[in-house]
Image (tube, rainbow, N blue to C red):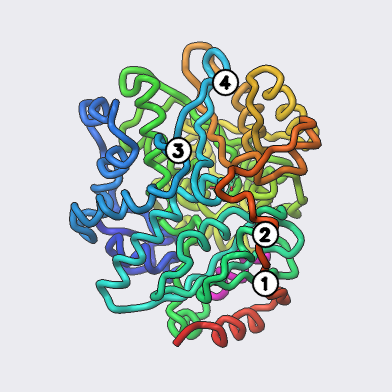
Protein backbone atom coordinates (compact mmCIF):
# COMPACT_ATOMS: atom_id res chain seq x y z
CA UNK A 1 0.00 0.00 0.00
CA UNK A 2 1.35 3.41 -1.01
CA UNK A 3 0.40 6.62 0.77
CA UNK A 4 -0.41 9.85 -1.06
CA UNK A 5 -0.87 13.47 0.02
CA UNK A 6 -4.24 15.23 0.01
CA UNK A 7 -2.57 18.07 -1.90
CA UNK A 8 -1.09 15.86 -4.59
CA UNK A 9 2.43 17.35 -4.64
CA UNK A 10 4.40 15.18 -2.18
CA UNK A 11 6.21 11.92 -2.91
CA UNK A 12 4.32 8.65 -2.37
CA UNK A 13 5.49 6.91 0.80
CA UNK A 14 5.20 3.55 2.49
CA UNK A 15 3.15 3.25 5.68
CA UNK A 16 6.29 3.41 7.80
CA UNK A 17 7.58 6.51 6.02
CA UNK A 18 4.22 8.27 6.22
CA UNK A 19 4.02 7.44 9.93
CA UNK A 20 7.51 8.73 10.69
CA UNK A 21 6.90 11.89 8.62
CA UNK A 22 3.44 12.94 9.83
CA UNK A 23 2.65 15.98 7.66
CA UNK A 24 3.44 15.72 3.93
CA UNK A 25 5.98 18.12 2.47
CA UNK A 26 3.35 19.87 0.35
CA UNK A 27 1.47 20.72 3.55
CA UNK A 28 -1.08 17.96 2.93
CA UNK A 29 -2.07 14.87 4.91
CA UNK A 30 -1.25 11.31 3.97
CA UNK A 31 -3.94 8.82 2.92
CA UNK A 32 -3.74 5.31 1.49
CA UNK A 33 -3.72 5.37 -2.31
CA UNK A 34 -6.65 2.92 -2.17
CA UNK A 35 -8.94 2.10 0.72
CA UNK A 36 -8.87 -1.65 1.36
CA UNK A 37 -12.29 -3.32 1.41
CA UNK A 38 -13.34 -6.22 3.63
CA UNK A 39 -15.97 -8.64 2.38
CA UNK A 40 -19.17 -9.15 4.35
CA UNK A 41 -17.89 -12.64 5.27
CA UNK A 42 -14.63 -11.23 6.57
CA UNK A 43 -16.56 -8.71 8.67
CA UNK A 44 -18.94 -11.40 9.98
CA UNK A 45 -15.91 -13.47 11.01
CA UNK A 46 -14.81 -10.71 13.42
CA UNK A 47 -17.72 -11.50 15.75
CA UNK A 48 -16.51 -13.00 19.00
CA UNK A 49 -12.81 -12.26 18.42
CA UNK A 50 -10.87 -10.31 21.04
CA UNK A 51 -9.99 -6.66 20.43
CA UNK A 52 -6.38 -7.37 19.50
CA UNK A 53 -7.34 -9.91 16.82
CA UNK A 54 -9.92 -7.54 15.33
CA UNK A 55 -7.25 -4.84 15.36
CA UNK A 56 -4.86 -7.10 13.48
CA UNK A 57 -7.36 -8.06 10.77
CA UNK A 58 -8.62 -4.51 10.22
CA UNK A 59 -5.21 -2.82 10.11
CA UNK A 60 -3.08 -5.47 8.40
CA UNK A 61 -3.79 -4.44 4.77
CA UNK A 62 -2.59 -0.92 5.58
CA UNK A 63 0.76 -1.92 7.10
CA UNK A 64 1.71 -5.27 5.59
CA UNK A 65 4.59 -3.83 3.54
CA UNK A 66 6.21 -2.24 6.59
CA UNK A 67 5.93 -4.91 9.29
CA UNK A 68 6.09 -8.69 9.52
CA UNK A 69 2.88 -10.41 10.60
CA UNK A 70 4.24 -11.63 13.95
CA UNK A 71 5.93 -8.32 14.63
CA UNK A 72 2.66 -6.47 14.07
CA UNK A 73 0.72 -8.83 16.32
CA UNK A 74 3.25 -8.22 19.11
CA UNK A 75 3.04 -4.46 18.59
CA UNK A 76 -0.74 -4.62 19.03
CA UNK A 77 -0.46 -6.84 22.10
CA UNK A 78 1.99 -4.45 23.80
CA UNK A 79 -0.08 -1.38 22.84
CA UNK A 80 -3.20 -2.52 24.66
CA UNK A 81 -1.82 -4.57 27.56
CA UNK A 82 -1.84 -1.52 29.89
CA UNK A 83 -5.56 -0.89 29.47
CA UNK A 84 -7.76 -1.18 32.53
CA UNK A 85 -10.50 -3.24 30.85
CA UNK A 86 -10.13 -6.64 29.17
CA UNK A 87 -12.53 -5.69 26.40
CA UNK A 88 -10.39 -2.55 25.70
CA UNK A 89 -13.43 -0.75 24.19
CA UNK A 90 -16.53 -2.07 26.00
CA UNK A 91 -20.04 -1.15 24.86
CA UNK A 92 -22.57 -0.09 27.46
CA UNK A 93 -26.28 0.24 26.83
CA UNK A 94 -27.69 3.66 27.72
CA UNK A 95 -31.29 3.09 26.73
CA UNK A 96 -33.33 1.04 24.30
CA UNK A 97 -31.38 1.72 21.13
CA UNK A 98 -28.50 3.90 22.27
CA UNK A 99 -25.08 2.59 23.30
CA UNK A 100 -21.93 4.15 24.73
CA UNK A 101 -18.58 2.95 23.39
CA UNK A 102 -16.24 3.42 26.35
CA UNK A 103 -12.88 4.51 24.96
CA UNK A 104 -11.38 5.73 28.23
CA UNK A 105 -9.82 2.66 29.78
CA UNK A 106 -6.27 3.44 28.59
CA UNK A 107 -3.45 4.91 30.68
CA UNK A 108 -4.54 8.58 30.30
CA UNK A 109 -8.30 7.96 30.43
CA UNK A 110 -9.16 9.25 26.94
CA UNK A 111 -9.67 7.62 23.55
CA UNK A 112 -6.39 9.00 22.24
CA UNK A 113 -4.59 6.19 24.08
CA UNK A 114 -5.92 3.74 21.47
CA UNK A 115 -3.90 5.41 18.73
CA UNK A 116 -1.02 6.74 20.75
CA UNK A 117 -0.11 3.50 22.53
CA UNK A 118 -0.04 1.77 19.15
CA UNK A 119 2.04 4.51 17.52
CA UNK A 120 4.56 4.39 20.39
CA UNK A 121 5.16 0.70 19.73
CA UNK A 122 5.22 1.20 15.94
CA UNK A 123 7.82 3.99 16.25
CA UNK A 124 9.97 1.96 18.58
CA UNK A 125 10.12 -1.04 16.26
CA UNK A 126 10.66 1.06 13.13
CA UNK A 127 13.37 3.28 14.64
CA UNK A 128 15.24 0.37 16.17
CA UNK A 129 15.36 -1.34 12.81
CA UNK A 130 16.67 1.89 11.20
CA UNK A 131 19.09 2.61 14.05
CA UNK A 132 17.65 6.13 14.05
CA UNK A 133 16.11 8.62 16.47
CA UNK A 134 13.43 11.34 16.15
CA UNK A 135 12.09 14.40 17.94
CA UNK A 136 8.37 14.22 18.40
CA UNK A 137 6.61 17.54 18.76
CA UNK A 138 2.90 17.59 19.42
CA UNK A 139 0.30 20.29 20.00
CA UNK A 140 -2.50 19.44 22.36
CA UNK A 141 -5.77 20.76 23.63
CA UNK A 142 -5.15 18.43 26.56
CA UNK A 143 -5.63 14.77 25.81
CA UNK A 144 -3.23 14.23 22.89
CA UNK A 145 -0.29 15.50 24.91
CA UNK A 146 -0.76 13.24 27.87
CA UNK A 147 -1.45 10.28 25.61
CA UNK A 148 1.75 10.97 23.62
CA UNK A 149 3.83 11.36 26.75
CA UNK A 150 2.51 8.08 28.17
CA UNK A 151 3.20 6.33 24.88
CA UNK A 152 6.78 7.59 24.36
CA UNK A 153 8.15 8.17 27.87
CA UNK A 154 11.40 6.35 28.49
CA UNK A 155 11.97 5.33 24.83
CA UNK A 156 15.62 6.09 24.06
CA UNK A 157 15.18 6.78 20.35
CA UNK A 158 12.68 9.58 20.93
CA UNK A 159 12.42 13.00 22.59
CA UNK A 160 8.85 14.23 23.12
CA UNK A 161 7.94 17.93 23.30
CA UNK A 162 4.31 18.75 23.94
CA UNK A 163 2.90 22.25 23.38
CA UNK A 164 -0.26 22.97 25.35
CA UNK A 165 -2.19 26.23 25.81
CA UNK A 166 -1.20 27.67 29.19
CA UNK A 167 -4.15 27.77 31.59
CA UNK A 168 -6.57 26.13 29.14
CA UNK A 169 -6.26 22.45 30.00
CA UNK A 170 -7.82 20.76 33.01
CA UNK A 171 -5.67 20.12 36.07
CA UNK A 172 -5.74 16.36 35.50
CA UNK A 173 -4.68 16.84 31.88
CA UNK A 174 -1.87 19.19 32.92
CA UNK A 175 -0.61 16.90 35.65
CA UNK A 176 -0.62 13.92 33.31
CA UNK A 177 1.78 15.91 31.08
CA UNK A 178 3.97 17.52 33.74
CA UNK A 179 4.47 14.70 36.24
CA UNK A 180 6.25 11.97 34.19
CA UNK A 181 9.88 12.12 35.37
CA UNK A 182 11.47 10.59 32.24
CA UNK A 183 14.24 12.81 30.83
CA UNK A 184 12.95 12.47 27.23
CA UNK A 185 9.63 14.15 28.17
CA UNK A 186 9.29 17.95 27.81
CA UNK A 187 6.01 19.76 28.59
CA UNK A 188 5.76 23.32 27.19
CA UNK A 189 3.00 25.69 28.37
CA UNK A 190 2.50 28.13 25.48
CA UNK A 191 1.02 31.60 25.98
CA UNK A 192 -1.78 31.14 23.46
CA UNK A 193 -4.74 28.91 22.63
CA UNK A 194 -4.79 25.47 21.01
CA UNK A 195 -5.01 26.87 17.49
CA UNK A 196 -1.80 28.85 18.21
CA UNK A 197 -0.07 25.65 19.34
CA UNK A 198 -1.29 23.80 16.27
CA UNK A 199 -0.19 26.66 13.98
CA UNK A 200 3.28 26.72 15.58
CA UNK A 201 3.57 22.99 15.02
CA UNK A 202 2.61 23.34 11.35
CA UNK A 203 5.17 26.15 10.96
CA UNK A 204 7.90 23.92 12.42
CA UNK A 205 7.04 21.23 9.89
CA UNK A 206 7.24 23.78 7.10
CA UNK A 207 10.65 25.03 8.31
CA UNK A 208 12.62 22.32 6.50
CA UNK A 209 16.00 23.26 8.05
CA UNK A 210 14.59 22.84 11.52
CA UNK A 211 12.52 19.82 10.53
CA UNK A 212 15.49 17.95 9.10
CA UNK A 213 17.94 19.21 11.74
CA UNK A 214 16.05 17.76 14.70
CA UNK A 215 14.46 14.88 12.72
CA UNK A 216 11.02 16.18 13.53
CA UNK A 217 8.18 13.68 13.67
CA UNK A 218 4.54 14.38 14.39
CA UNK A 219 2.01 12.30 16.24
CA UNK A 220 -0.89 14.73 16.14
CA UNK A 221 -4.12 13.44 14.71
CA UNK A 222 -2.81 14.36 11.25
CA UNK A 223 -0.57 11.28 11.47
CA UNK A 224 -2.28 8.57 9.45
CA UNK A 225 -1.20 5.87 11.92
CA UNK A 226 -3.42 7.57 14.50
CA UNK A 227 -6.43 7.49 12.22
CA UNK A 228 -5.73 3.86 11.37
CA UNK A 229 -5.77 2.71 15.01
CA UNK A 230 -9.15 4.39 15.49
CA UNK A 231 -10.83 2.48 12.67
CA UNK A 232 -10.65 -0.68 14.77
CA UNK A 233 -13.22 0.16 17.43
CA UNK A 234 -15.85 1.07 14.84
CA UNK A 235 -15.58 -2.52 13.67
CA UNK A 236 -15.50 -4.09 17.15
CA UNK A 237 -18.55 -2.09 18.25
CA UNK A 238 -20.62 -2.57 15.10
CA UNK A 239 -19.93 -6.30 14.95
CA UNK A 240 -20.96 -6.77 18.56
CA UNK A 241 -24.34 -5.19 17.66
CA UNK A 242 -24.91 -7.42 14.67
CA UNK A 243 -22.94 -6.00 11.75
CA UNK A 244 -22.63 -6.80 8.92
CA UNK A 245 -26.22 -8.12 9.10
CA UNK A 246 -27.48 -4.98 10.80
CA UNK A 247 -26.61 -1.32 10.22
CA UNK A 248 -25.48 0.95 13.04
CA UNK A 249 -24.90 4.69 13.34
CA UNK A 250 -22.21 6.51 15.29
CA UNK A 251 -22.15 9.89 16.99
CA UNK A 252 -18.69 11.27 17.61
CA UNK A 253 -17.73 14.25 19.80
CA UNK A 254 -15.42 16.00 17.39
CA UNK A 255 -12.76 18.68 17.27
CA UNK A 256 -10.05 17.82 14.80
CA UNK A 257 -12.24 15.37 12.84
CA UNK A 258 -9.73 12.56 13.37
CA UNK A 259 -11.91 10.15 15.27
CA UNK A 260 -14.94 10.52 13.02
CA UNK A 261 -12.81 10.33 9.90
CA UNK A 262 -11.71 6.88 11.09
CA UNK A 263 -15.43 6.00 11.10
CA UNK A 264 -15.70 7.20 7.51
CA UNK A 265 -12.83 4.90 6.51
CA UNK A 266 -14.51 2.00 8.34
CA UNK A 267 -17.59 2.63 6.23
CA UNK A 268 -15.56 2.77 3.02
CA UNK A 269 -13.93 -0.53 4.05
CA UNK A 270 -17.36 -2.16 3.95
CA UNK A 271 -18.71 -1.76 7.49
CA UNK A 272 -22.46 -1.05 7.16
CA UNK A 273 -22.60 2.33 8.92
CA UNK A 274 -25.80 4.27 8.34
CA UNK A 275 -24.99 7.78 9.65
CA UNK A 276 -21.84 9.37 11.05
CA UNK A 277 -22.94 12.25 13.26
CA UNK A 278 -20.52 15.05 14.13
CA UNK A 279 -21.12 16.52 17.60
CA UNK A 280 -19.48 19.87 18.37
CA UNK A 281 -19.47 22.27 21.29
CA UNK A 282 -19.86 26.03 20.82
CA UNK A 283 -16.72 25.94 18.66
CA UNK A 284 -18.82 24.77 15.79
CA UNK A 285 -16.96 25.32 12.52
CA UNK A 286 -17.72 21.72 11.49
CA UNK A 287 -21.42 22.02 12.27
CA UNK A 288 -21.66 25.32 10.41
CA UNK A 289 -19.84 23.83 7.44
CA UNK A 290 -22.00 20.70 7.31
CA UNK A 291 -25.07 22.96 7.59
CA UNK A 292 -24.02 24.63 4.35
CA UNK A 293 -22.55 27.83 5.76
CA UNK A 294 -19.04 27.30 4.39
CA UNK A 295 -15.83 26.63 6.26
CA UNK A 296 -14.89 29.90 7.95
CA UNK A 297 -12.72 30.29 11.03
CA UNK A 298 -14.13 31.94 14.12
CA UNK A 299 -12.49 32.75 17.44
CA UNK A 300 -11.95 29.79 19.73
CA UNK A 301 -14.13 30.16 22.84
CA UNK A 302 -12.93 28.20 25.89
CA UNK A 303 -15.53 25.62 26.97
CA UNK A 304 -16.05 22.86 29.53
CA UNK A 305 -15.17 20.36 26.77
CA UNK A 306 -11.67 21.76 26.10
CA UNK A 307 -10.49 18.88 23.91
CA UNK A 308 -12.93 20.11 21.28
CA UNK A 309 -12.07 23.82 21.50
CA UNK A 310 -10.86 23.99 17.94
CA UNK A 311 -11.70 26.25 15.03
CA UNK A 312 -9.48 24.72 12.38
CA UNK A 313 -10.16 21.03 12.09
CA UNK A 314 -7.04 19.48 10.55
CA UNK A 315 -8.45 16.13 9.52
CA UNK A 316 -11.43 17.67 7.75
CA UNK A 317 -8.99 18.14 4.87
CA UNK A 318 -9.06 14.36 4.44
CA UNK A 319 -12.85 14.30 4.19
CA UNK A 320 -12.74 17.20 1.73
CA UNK A 321 -10.23 15.30 -0.38
CA UNK A 322 -12.75 12.52 -0.98
CA UNK A 323 -15.68 14.93 -1.25
CA UNK A 324 -13.80 16.75 -4.02
CA UNK A 325 -13.22 13.52 -5.95
CA UNK A 326 -9.58 13.06 -4.84
CA UNK A 327 -8.52 16.31 -6.52
CA UNK A 328 -5.33 17.38 -4.71
CA UNK A 329 -5.11 20.64 -6.64
CA UNK A 330 -8.58 21.69 -5.47
CA UNK A 331 -7.66 20.89 -1.85
CA UNK A 332 -4.41 22.87 -2.06
CA UNK A 333 -6.41 25.86 -3.29
CA UNK A 334 -9.03 25.59 -0.52
CA UNK A 335 -6.30 25.38 2.11
CA UNK A 336 -4.75 28.55 0.67
CA UNK A 337 -8.11 30.30 1.05
CA UNK A 338 -8.35 29.04 4.63
CA UNK A 339 -5.21 31.02 5.49
CA UNK A 340 -7.18 34.22 4.89
CA UNK A 341 -10.36 33.15 6.66
CA UNK A 342 -12.12 30.29 4.93
CA UNK A 343 -13.96 29.04 1.87
CA UNK A 344 -17.32 27.90 0.58
CA UNK A 345 -17.69 24.20 -0.20
CA UNK A 346 -18.82 23.40 -3.75
CA UNK A 347 -22.31 21.99 -4.21
CA UNK A 348 -21.02 18.60 -5.38
CA UNK A 349 -18.71 18.28 -2.40
CA UNK A 350 -21.51 19.28 0.00
CA UNK A 351 -23.68 16.51 -1.42
CA UNK A 352 -20.85 14.01 -0.98
CA UNK A 353 -20.33 15.08 2.64
CA UNK A 354 -24.06 14.90 3.41
CA UNK A 355 -24.22 11.32 2.10
CA UNK A 356 -22.26 10.26 5.18
CA UNK A 357 -22.31 12.98 7.81
CA UNK A 358 -24.90 14.73 9.95
CA UNK A 359 -24.02 17.25 12.63
CA UNK A 360 -25.20 19.01 15.75
CA UNK A 361 -23.92 21.69 18.13
CA UNK A 362 -24.38 21.68 21.89
CA UNK A 363 -24.24 24.73 24.19
CA UNK A 364 -22.55 24.79 27.58
CA UNK A 365 -25.92 24.70 29.38
CA UNK A 366 -27.10 21.73 27.32
CA UNK A 367 -23.84 19.92 28.06
CA UNK A 368 -24.32 20.31 31.80
CA UNK A 369 -27.99 19.33 31.56
CA UNK A 370 -27.08 16.18 29.60
CA UNK A 371 -24.51 15.09 32.20
CA UNK A 372 -27.29 15.38 34.80
CA UNK A 373 -30.02 13.69 32.77
CA UNK A 374 -27.71 10.82 31.76
CA UNK A 375 -26.89 10.20 35.41
CA UNK A 376 -30.58 10.35 36.36
CA UNK A 377 -31.89 8.19 33.52
CA UNK A 378 -29.06 5.69 32.91
CA UNK A 379 -26.94 5.85 36.09
CA UNK A 380 -23.87 6.79 34.03
CA UNK A 381 -21.57 9.65 34.99
CA UNK A 382 -20.13 10.97 31.71
CA UNK A 383 -17.48 13.54 30.77
CA UNK A 384 -18.57 16.78 29.03
CA UNK A 385 -17.34 15.62 25.59
CA UNK A 386 -19.32 12.43 25.88
CA UNK A 387 -22.38 14.41 27.01
CA UNK A 388 -22.17 16.46 23.83
CA UNK A 389 -22.19 13.24 21.85
CA UNK A 390 -25.16 11.88 23.78
CA UNK A 391 -27.22 15.04 23.23
CA UNK A 392 -26.56 15.16 19.49
CA UNK A 393 -27.14 11.40 19.19
CA UNK A 394 -30.55 11.68 20.84
CA UNK A 395 -31.47 14.43 18.37
CA UNK A 396 -30.40 12.29 15.37
CA UNK A 397 -31.46 8.83 16.42
CA UNK A 398 -33.53 6.73 14.00
CA UNK A 399 -35.95 4.26 15.55
CA UNK A 400 -34.68 1.20 13.69
CA UNK A 401 -30.90 1.73 13.71
CA UNK A 402 -28.81 1.32 16.88
CA UNK A 403 -26.89 4.48 17.74
CA UNK A 404 -23.41 4.20 19.25
CA UNK A 405 -22.02 7.32 20.90
CA UNK A 406 -18.27 7.41 21.46
CA UNK A 407 -17.45 8.06 25.14
CA UNK A 408 -14.17 9.83 24.54
CA UNK A 409 -12.91 10.50 28.07
CA UNK A 410 -13.36 9.33 31.66
CA UNK A 411 -15.40 11.78 33.77
CA UNK A 412 -12.52 12.05 36.29
CA UNK A 413 -10.50 13.87 33.64
CA UNK A 414 -12.94 16.79 33.86
CA UNK A 415 -14.04 16.73 37.52
CA UNK A 416 -15.01 20.41 37.85
CA UNK A 417 -17.59 20.37 35.06
CA UNK A 418 -18.92 16.94 36.00
CA UNK A 419 -19.36 17.93 39.63
CA UNK A 420 -21.00 21.22 38.70
CA UNK A 421 -23.51 19.41 36.50
CA UNK A 422 -24.28 16.40 38.66
CA UNK A 423 -23.23 17.17 42.24
CA UNK A 424 -21.08 14.04 42.13
CA UNK A 425 -17.30 14.02 42.26
CA UNK A 426 -15.90 11.50 39.75
CA UNK A 427 -13.00 9.67 41.42
CA UNK A 428 -9.79 8.81 39.53
CA UNK A 429 -9.26 5.08 38.97
CA UNK A 430 -7.08 3.72 41.76
CA UNK A 431 -4.06 3.15 39.49
CA UNK A 432 -3.56 6.93 39.23
CA UNK A 433 -4.97 8.17 42.51
CA UNK A 434 -1.62 9.77 43.57
CA UNK A 435 -1.57 12.10 40.54
CA UNK A 436 -2.09 15.20 42.70
CA UNK A 437 0.93 14.42 44.88
CA UNK A 438 3.50 13.92 42.11
CA UNK A 439 5.92 16.87 41.42
CA UNK A 440 5.35 18.83 38.19
CA UNK A 441 7.96 19.79 35.57
CA UNK A 442 6.96 22.34 32.87
CA UNK A 443 8.44 25.25 30.87
CA UNK A 444 6.26 28.29 30.18
CA UNK A 445 7.10 29.71 26.77
CA UNK A 446 6.01 32.57 24.44
CA UNK A 447 3.84 31.84 21.41
CA UNK A 448 6.81 32.49 19.14
CA UNK A 449 8.23 30.11 16.55
CA UNK A 450 11.86 31.16 17.09
CA UNK A 451 11.65 30.70 20.85
CA UNK A 452 10.02 27.29 20.48
CA UNK A 453 12.49 25.99 17.91
CA UNK A 454 15.41 27.27 19.97
CA UNK A 455 14.14 25.57 23.11
CA UNK A 456 13.69 22.26 21.31
CA UNK A 457 17.16 22.38 19.72
CA UNK A 458 18.75 22.99 23.09
CA UNK A 459 16.90 20.19 24.87
CA UNK A 460 17.13 17.18 22.59
CA UNK A 461 19.44 14.38 23.65
CA UNK A 462 22.53 13.84 21.48
C1 LIG B 1 -9.42 14.71 21.21
C2 LIG B 1 -10.73 14.56 21.87
C3 LIG B 1 -11.92 14.76 21.16
C4 LIG B 1 -11.92 15.17 19.70
O1 LIG B 1 -11.36 14.20 18.88
P1 LIG B 1 -10.95 14.55 17.38
O2 LIG B 1 -10.32 13.33 16.84
O3 LIG B 1 -10.02 15.71 17.48
O4 LIG B 1 -12.18 14.92 16.67
C5 LIG B 1 -13.10 14.54 21.81
N1 LIG B 1 -13.14 14.19 23.11
C6 LIG B 1 -12.03 14.01 23.84
C7 LIG B 1 -12.12 13.64 25.27
C8 LIG B 1 -10.77 14.18 23.23
O5 LIG B 1 -9.66 14.00 23.95
Image vertical order of residue 351 relative to residue 283, above or below:
above
Would residue 172 be visible to someone looking at this image?
A: yes
Residues 67 and 375: in front is: 375
Q: Are marks 1 and 2 in contact (CB under 8 Å)?
A: yes
Q: Position of residue 398 (x, y in %)?
A: 53, 16
Distance from Cα at disc 2 to Cα at disc 3: 24 Å
Q: Which residue is mark 1?
A: 442
Q: Give the main secondary structure, helix, strand or loop, of the magenta stretch.
A: helix
Say which residue label 4 marks: 94
Is there any visible trace of residue 354 in the rendered image?
A: no
Task: Judge left or right: residue 46 versus residue 316.
Answer: left
Secondary structure at badge 2 equals helix
SS label for mark 4: strand
Mark 2 C-beta to ligand 1 under 8 Å: no
**What x and y, as percent, mark residue 323?**
45, 43
Q: Quick one: 45 or 394, which is closer to the camera? A: 45
Which residue is identified by label 3? 85
Q: Answer few, some or many: residues within 10 Å of disc 1's Cα (few below 14, many 20 plus, some between 14 and 19).
A: some
Question: Which residue appears at 42% of the width and 44% of the height?
Answer: 230
Q: Quadrant of residue 239?
A: top left
Which secondary structure lies at badge 3? Answer: loop
Amino acid sequence: MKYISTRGQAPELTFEEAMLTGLARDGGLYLPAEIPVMTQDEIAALAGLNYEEIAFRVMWPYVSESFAEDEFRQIIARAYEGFGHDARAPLKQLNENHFLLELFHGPTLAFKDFAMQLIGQLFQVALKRRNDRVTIVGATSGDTGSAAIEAFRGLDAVDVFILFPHGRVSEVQRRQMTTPADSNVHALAVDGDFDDCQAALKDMFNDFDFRDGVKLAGVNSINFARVLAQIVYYFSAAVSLGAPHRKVSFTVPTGNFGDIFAGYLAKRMGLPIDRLVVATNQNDILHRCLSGEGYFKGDTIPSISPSMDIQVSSNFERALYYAYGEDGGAIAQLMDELKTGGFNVSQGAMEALRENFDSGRVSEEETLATIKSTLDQSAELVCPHTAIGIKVAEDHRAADVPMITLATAHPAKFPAAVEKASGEHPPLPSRMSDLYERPERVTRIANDLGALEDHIKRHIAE
